[in-house]
Amino acid sequence: MGQVFITLVGFSSGFIVAGGVVALMVGLGIITRFIGISHTADKIFQYEDAILLGAVAGTLLTVYDLSLPVGAWILGIGGLFIGIFVGGWIMALAEVINVFPVYCRRLGITKGLSWIVITMAVGKTAGSLLGFYMRWGKG
């Protein structure tokens, strides 16, 4: 009986967290921005399927200790797509809370904003690659 209760609590918590993540994605406008930029509004069902399959795959790979027999190049491609997705989240969140306009106004920046964004992206990429190379965070 205890295992059934724990399972029910686990599934319920998972549904709540998943609902919150989807609500955040919709609230930030990440999905609609991706659709608008790529001009692929006619593929909305494929977007929904991809989000669902990505969530299920991420959950399975996180909860269970699964290993996939793929080469390093597949991992590199997966890392690239994951980085693009996380970067989209960060930029959408920064846009929603108006980070860049506030910083530019306070610092008096009128030109070169695109170079600042590019520099931040290059710095984030270099820091991530250095962290992976040095294996920081590995116990």
Image: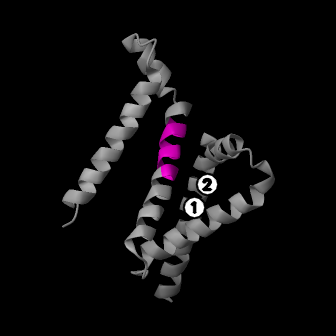
Which residue position holds label 2? Answer: 22
Where is residue 111? Give x, y as percent. 45, 14
Q: Residue at (53%, 85%) from the top-left corner?
A: 4
The span shown in magenta is: 84-93
Where is residue 124? Give x, y as percent. 34, 42
Asked if labels 2 and 1 touch by Cβ distance under 8 angstroms, the answer is: yes
Whether residue 132 appears in magenta in the rendering, the answer is no
Q: Answer left or right for 16 relative to 35.
A: left
Q: Answer left or right for 132 relative to 116.
A: left
Whether residue 89 appears in magenta in the rendering, the answer is yes
Q: Amino acid at mark 2?
A: Val
How many numbered markers are drawn?
A: 2
Q: Residue at (50%, 69%) from the top-left corner?
A: 58
Residue 89 drawn above or below residue 111: below
Q: Quadrant of residue 57?
A: bottom right
Which residue position holds label 1? Answer: 18
Q: Which secondary structure is most common in the magenta stretch?
A: helix
Q: Look at the image and tell me whether residue 86 can be seen.
A: yes
Where is residue 90? Give x, y as percent. 47, 42
